[in-house]
Structures are given as structure tokens and as C-alpha cells.
Amino acid sequence: MRSLLDETTVGPYLIGRNVIPPGPVRARTLAGGVSNVVLLVEAGGTWGDESGRTRVVLKQARDRLRVADDWRADPARAQSEAAALRVLHALDPDTVPAVLDDDPVARTLTVAAAPPTWVTWKDRLLAGDADPAVAGRLGAVLRRWHTATGGDRPLPEPLEGTDGFRQLRLDPYFGTAARRRPDLAPAVERRVAELAARRTCLVSGDLSPKNVLVGDGDLWVVDLEVAHRGDPAFDVAFLVTHLLLKAVHLAGQTQQAEHGGDRPAADGLRRCLRAFVDAYGPG
């Protein structure tokens, strides 16, 4: 059985793989970690001074997800994510982190860390900062990805399989819905068959606001462990659904309007939804 890395072991591991320089290392576990161990690692430089410091994020795929149910998934998804990030970094280098290392034995992936001032788009949205410009940039990014990887363009072999998508999306999302609502099962199962059959372009499979990092007018999309050649409609619907659910969550709350006064917080999310769809739509 593979050993899972932690804050005490990740430094020597990354030094041994020549990802970070020898010397003092600081590591801390990042939020989430349901399907992966996720560690921010800093090395080199002088503490308190960002210049000259190496900052990386290591992800290690869990065989069994950290949930109450016995939910298992193939840890080879770490290498699928590495393949997807490399494809997208070559295509659009400012929209995903650079891959620094991937280890098919330990099932790890190490990428460049975002600047320390960046936050998730989810945090901004729930704080009432619903900027349609971010949504528009994301829609344009997704359009470029889907267009550039569509048709007969070859993708790395790990991205041609759909095991991760089935284990982490189709079975737990659609399968659970069909079991709990047998009256809806036929419609759900038809959609699953369509998703499995349509192999159009590289699909993220997890395009939600928590996986979009924003700051300094830029954004990164992260967490592509279920990326695969599939149905581009899934990415669009996944993001739209998250925005709609946040609008429901914020119903009744208000936020400061740009020109003074208050407005319903959900209105900002609806503007984001429209900006995303409009930017994705052309082409």
C-alpha cells in the first residue's frame, strides 16, 4: 500500500525528487483534501521575504476518498491530471499552473503555487464579490480549450479513458440520483449514456468556482483530475449549476451596488452566469 505524504514527510520527498532545493521547508495542509492529500510547500529564500522562495502545491491521489461512504477511485487520476495540465499549459499558459513533477509510483502531482494573495472564486462569490468580468474570462478560456482540443486532435493516452470521470462523477452523481429517485432513473440513465458516448474534446469535469483561483486580474483553473475526452456540455452545465445554487444560497441577502445602495446578492451571480455563457457561446 502506498504511504500518504504529510506535512513532515513531503519536504524530504520533494527534495529527493529535485523539485525544491535542500534546506528548511515549510508545509501545510490545504483545505479540501477529500479525494487527495493537498499540501502547500515552501522552500528556499528567507522567511518573511517572498523573493527567492520556491512555492509549490503537491497533490497525492487517495485510493479511498475521505468520506463516510466507501467511495474508491483509481489513483492513476493523478497522472491524468498531469497530462491535462500539460496540454492546457502548452495551449494557454496563463490559465493553469505549470506541472513541476508527477510520480506514477507514489501517484503524486506537483504544480506551481498561485501567488499568496490569490483566492478561490467561490470565496469571492460567497463574500458578495460577484464580478461578471471574471465569469467572462472563464467562459472565453473554456471556449478556447474546447475548440483547440476538439475534432481529431490527439490527446495523451490517459485523457482518452473515462474511468476517473465515471468513478468520481457519473456513478456518485447520476447513479445516486437514479437510485434515490427511481421515477427519474430512465431520464438520468439516458443522459449518462449520452455523456459516455460523446467524445468531442478535452473536458475538465470539475469546473466549479472552488477550482478557479483569481487575483491580480488573472485566473487559474485547477483540479483537473477527472479531465478526459468527453462532452463539453458537462463543463458548461457544471459551472452554471454552481452559480445557480449559490444564487439560491444567497437569496434574501444584499450586497453593495457599484454606484451606491444595495442590491440582491443573487443578482450578481445571475450576471456572472450570463457573462460566462455569452463569452463561451461565440464559436
Image (cartoon, rainbow, N blue to C red):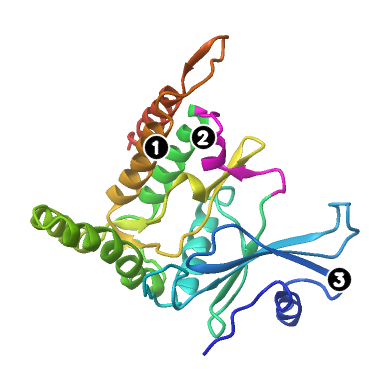
Looking at numbered disc 2 in the image, what kind of residue is underneath it? Leu
**Would you say 130 lies left or right of 150 here?**
right
Whole-number angstrom distance, CA of label 3 to CA of label 2? 36 Å
Select label 3 or label 2 by which is in front: 2
> Along the line of sight, which residue is nearer the eye, 184 or 85?
184
Can you give x and y, in whole percent of width and height, for residue 3 in the image? 59, 85
Q: Earlier in the sequence, mark 3 or mark 1?
A: 3
Q: Secondary structure at mark 3?
A: loop
- The residue beneath circle 3 is 24
- The residue beneath circle 2 is 125
> Along the line of sight, which residue is nearer the eye, 78 or 31?
31
- Marks 2 and 1: in contact by CB < 8 Å? yes
**Would you say 235 lies left or right of 96 here?**
left
Is 41 located above or below residue 61 in the figure?
above
Question: At 11% from the left edge and 58% from the top edge, which residue is drawn?
Answer: 182
- Specify few, some or many for label 2: CA neighbours under 10 Å numbering under 14, 14-19, or 20 or more: many
Q: Which residues are magenta?
A: 115-131
> Along the line of sight, which residue is nearer the eye, 263 or 61?
263
- The residue beneath circle 1 is 243
Query: Is residue 31 located in the magenta-colored stretch of the structure?
Result: no
